[in-house]
Amino acid sequence: MVIKRFNFFYRNSSLGIILILFSALLTAVGQALWKVSGTNNLYILALGLILYVCGAVLMMIAFRFGDLSVLHPLLSFGYIFAVLIGGYFLKEQIGFKEIVGIIMIVLGAVLISVERK
């Protein structure tokens, strides 16, 4: 019973997808905090580093719950999160090129990540 339950969690692709997307979000937030910190705010820089490392560790954990060929392309959502964070919190311009890029990332990740039956 315990082994059967463990196998379910080991191959639960939905959990892997959720973890990999959260990993991409954490690394994007960590990088944004690096930018905000500059060189004069070590606390924000350290928080950014901690979030980035947590995202990397979460990514390694996520790979246990699905196929590499399905989960790894979803890391590209980190670029989407970075654009959205930059636009909303850092007041960076999001233009036509960024929107087209986001659409292409989403379409590419969906096409690559669709599991074959």
Image (cartoon, rainbow, N blue to C red):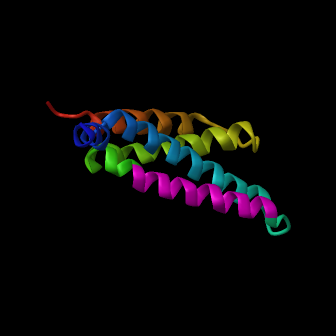
Q: Residue 108: x percent and y percent?
A: 34, 38
Q: Give the range drawn in magenta.
A: 43-61
Specify whether residue 33 is painted magenta. no
Q: In the depicted view, which residue is nearer to us: 99 or 82?
A: 82
Looking at the image, is 98 positioned above or below residue 37? above
Q: Residue 3: x percent and y percent?
A: 23, 43
From the image, which quarter does the C terminus lie in? top left
Q: Residue 102: x percent and y percent?
A: 49, 36
Direction bottom: furthest residue: 39
Q: Residue 80: x percent and y percent?
A: 53, 40
Direction right: furthest residue: 40
Looking at the image, is 89 positioned above or below residue 41? above
Q: Quadrant of residue 98?
A: top right
Looking at the image, is 54 positioned above or below residue 102? below
Position of 81 with respect to 69 (left or right) is right
Q: How many labels does the image show?
A: 0
From the image, which quarter does the N terminus lie in? top left
Direction front: furthest residue: 1
* Secondary structure that dominates the magenta span: helix
Q: Which residue is drawn at 65% across and 60% down?
A: 50
Position of 57 with respect to 41 (left or right) is left
Position of 107 with respect to 85 (left or right) is left
Q: Which residue is drawn at 56% across and 44% down?
A: 25
Q: In the depicted view, which residue is nearer to us: 49 or 5?
A: 5
Q: In which quarter of the image is residue 90?
A: top right
Looking at the image, is 39 positioned above or below residue 81? below
Position of 87 with respect to 76 (left or right) is right
Q: In which quarter of the image is residue 7?
A: top left
Q: Residue at x 49, y 57 (%)?
A: 57
Direction left: furthest residue: 117
Q: In the depicted view, which residue is nearer to us: 65 or 103?
A: 65
